[in-house]
Amino acid sequence: MTDDPVLFCLHFLGGSAREWRPLAAHLGPAARCVAIDLPGFGDAADQPGADVGAMADHVAARIRAERPGGPWLVAGNSMGAKVALALARRHEDGEEGLSGLAGLVLLAGSPPAPEPMAEERRQAMIAWIDADPETRRREAEAFVAANVGAPLDPEDHARTVEDVLRANPEAWKAWLTGGANEDWRARIGTLATPALVVSGAEDGDLGPEAQAALTLPHLARHRHVVARGAGHLLPLERPGALAALIRDFIAAPPGTGETPTLPPAFAALMGSERVNTRLRTALRERMREPDGPFCLAPEERATLAACLDRVLPQPGPGKIDLARRIDARLASGTGDGWRYAALPPDPQAYARALRSLDAAAAETHGRLFRDLAGHDQDALLDRAAAGRLPATPDGLAPELMTCWLEELRGEAVRTYLAHPAGLAAIGFTGIGAGGDDAEALPGYRLTGLDAREAWETPILETPILETSASTGDVR
Amino acid sequence: MNLAGQRRYGTDEVVDAVVVGTGAGGAPLLAELAAAGLRVVALEAGPNFDPAAYGFDETLADEIYWTEERLSGGSTPEAFGANNSGTGIGGSTLHWGAFVPRADPRDFRLHAESGEGCDWPLDHAELTPFYDRVEAFIGTSGPTPYPWDEARRFPLPPVLRNGPAQLMAAACGRLGIAATDAPAAVVSRAFTPGGAVPLRKACINCGFCHQGCRTRAKASMDVTYLPLAVAEGAEIRPDARMHGVERDKAGRITAVVYRSGGRDLRQRCANLILCAGAVETPRLLLHLDLATGSGQVGRNYIGHVATQVWGTFAHEVGMNRGYPSSLITEDYVRPQGADFAGGYLVQSLGVEPLTWGNAVARGRGLWGPALADYLRRYNQVAGIGINGETLPCDANILTLSDETDALGMRKAHISFGYGPNETSLNAHATALMRRIWEAAGATDIWVLERVAHTLGTCRMGRDPDASVVDPFGRSHEVENLWICDGSVFPSSLAANPALTIMALSLRTAGAFLGSRTSR
């Protein structure tokens, strides 16, 4: 991408163009923010509400008027993200005046599917927007407070509450009864436009699992970042971190789906009251890419990643970055309570074993392990498992590679099955054994063969994906 | 557990006993001594957990496992961590499977019967009243009558059978093997023994016994004996890691040194009772060079042959649901025509995904697409496993490694390997389990070699040269040192150990009290 792209910014329900001021300040010259009031909101509050298509028309007109000279991007927070997705589809369909879209930034986005939302809450929001001024103010305060992981600074909070109060109630209701429920799944299909998806670990219905289930499957090239401690109003809560992510995204957009998707049924269970808050928090944290500290050198981790791709292949699209997670575990110094006495401590064992693999790859093929074809990597792993890799200075003794590979297989599987995508892949319903009230946990009423409860059915009927290619068995 | 309002003792106060460890060995004894009016302080290395806060998750459950590193050597290295010792008030009973067979009387006289192994320095009949007391107090569920012990009465009916139990029951029926609902220390109905112990609601079949019981249906010590101990005046100190003792010129222990909140504290005491389990108890003794004169501390490390057989079924098994081991057969405690001493129990198995996946990856040796695809069979697989006798031998020993932990204590190094008896027993059991699983309709059957439990290392006996403690748990060498946990076991027994450890704990408590009055 060339310098100075334009970032068109679309706010959340009840927000306005002002939502983007902190992010614009943090982005500086990396991108020029053009924040737009959607019909019925902000300075456009005099306009009536609009459906998603009409909101996209409104934005498209503004983009055409702006005539960006170079590449441009669209960022959307919540409601705005659904409009951004619609625009991306129109861009990819070749609509005149919309060429040049280089990326989507979807922040706690409303997905193409009808937005998951408790009907009770929807009705309450519809009711109070038309209430007396005192109620409106109280509810608007509560609405903003409920949508952030931690309180905003008072100025941002006050401005956001004012935005909610100046929104056109008809536009507010139009979204809740219309736009949010529109089903754009077929229309959006799969977009090729690179997308940065950010979810808040403390968000409600549109948190990490909902994004992985409902948004990522529509994006062929995506990067999903889980923002620890953040709620739904990400541009206000994390402007600095978002600016850094957007700069990275512009510089190096994802070439594929980088992280795993989730089956909608599993995401819905994860978000339900059958799952306790501590577990949901932990599962969401495991969806976040660890940011260190790490133990292995970058090239060692690349070899580890190549190794893990062979040991525990993930059918995709998108895969759990097991190497990054294992590396973070090594650096944390925690373990599973034991190791083979013959092996050195884990960090050393990993570093040495990876050097042994690279040395063997160099000797056999003149290349690093990670640069070999899959079948050549498998052949080396077979030799390693049999204790027949050549001895290497600074490597692991050949006979110990057998033990290390056993450790690696175990650690790979434990890491995989700790992640929601792993649990979903095996059809595990146990996370639904009970929520927060320990005195009234549902558990399982049925425990026998071929006896499932109604709530388990959608999880159990998620199709099993086969992993293709030949099998590997060290025995 | 609720420790608010518990009685407190000053560290300069010479309490009657410091009990180190609050698991199956320490907790019943602590309650008994407190009830007898003694001033007792329990030191628990781990924290005080609120059961309601357990997460229904195997990784979150790391908090209740003893995950400080141990080094496993020998020809059959044993896995630790989630597999064995625990941490937190309640010790390993926080994660135990609550499978409560009683020891078979023949196992106490294994040497007399077979010339192999080691006899217990007590008669099984002596332990029966203690078993009865423990079961009535913690609330065991099971089938009365129990096919292999006519006298045994369960206070509560059996828990629900899960898929693996149904599969095993049908197959055993076809093969003429007696099998029935497992003896489980999980309450199938609301239960309280009365007094100071709060009511526990019936099991909800969540399947997470090994990850900490959120509803308190499982009989961990923090919901059974420890509330009683506190009500009777014991003090329990969490996050209190013992690592030293002070002794007088005669060698008697006068104080226990422990680390708490980053600093060392010292509790004066008239007696020390170590109940830290068969790894940490001998590790402390070796570290402190305490009662090591016989050279027996750390020797005779034993566990159980715990091989499992797995298969895939044309059913939706969903093995994570329900009490994990809900079927048992004791028909093979003395298999007919066996070429080995002792025997084994067989149980059905349902296992949570990480534990199972880890076993598949390590034990079955699968990798690549074969591993990924097999993991996706999770809801169609079921297991069957044994708990089998291991005989003590010289090669199986706990020693101290040259590596140290954060406290500067040398890490435990455990050498364990099967001898001919374990190998024969394992072959017999594996063939049987294969036969049962074939009869059950399993396909893709495979065998997971596995060792479980930590026992021995401070065996009890009458001969001070061949044992560490006397038949009641008192040190032969240090007059005011007692040991009460799985380390005193002279042989491993076919039965899972925890219920027997609890029964021994009551017995040792009685002996301890008797030793004071007779003084």
Image: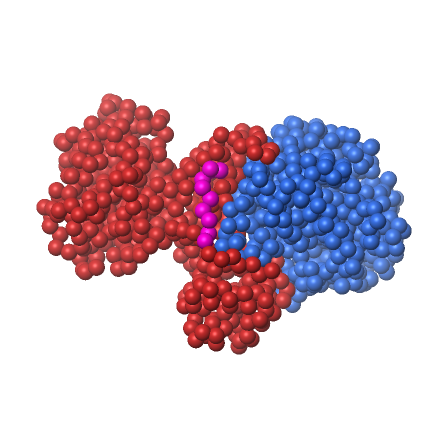
Would you say the magenta stretch is mainly helix, strand or loop?
loop
- Residue B444 shown left or right of residue B460 in the figure: left
Q: Is B294 one of the magenta-colored residues? A: no
- Residue B51 shown left or right of residue A30 in the figure: right
Q: In the rendered view, tell whether residue B159 sits above or below residue A309.
A: above
Q: Would you say residue B202 is visible in this rendering?
A: yes
Give x and y (percent) for residue A372.
43, 68
Q: In the rendered view, tell whether residue A12 sits above or below residue A105.
A: above
Displayed quadrant of residue B133: top right
Please report the residue visible at 70 percent of the width from the left and 43 percent of the height from the top: B436
Q: In the rendered view, tell whether residue B194 sits above or below residue A279.
A: above
- Camera-side residue of A441 and A162: A441
- Camera-side residue of B350 and B69: B350
Q: Please give the range of residues in magenta.
A: A459-468
Q: Residue furthest right?
A: B112
Please report the residue visible at 33 percent of the width from the left and 54 percent of the height from the top: A256
Q: Which corner quadrant holds the N terminus of chain B? A: top right
Displayed quadrant of residue A87: top left
Chain painted in blue in the figure: B
Give x and y (percent) for residue B257.
67, 55
- Residue B241 shown left or right of residue B473 in the figure: left
- Residue B464 shown left or right of residue A86 in the figure: right
Please report the residue visible at 66 percent of the width from the left and 48 percent of the height from the top: B309
Give x and y (percent) for residue B518.
88, 44
- Camera-side residue of B141 and A42: B141
Chain painted in red in the figure: A
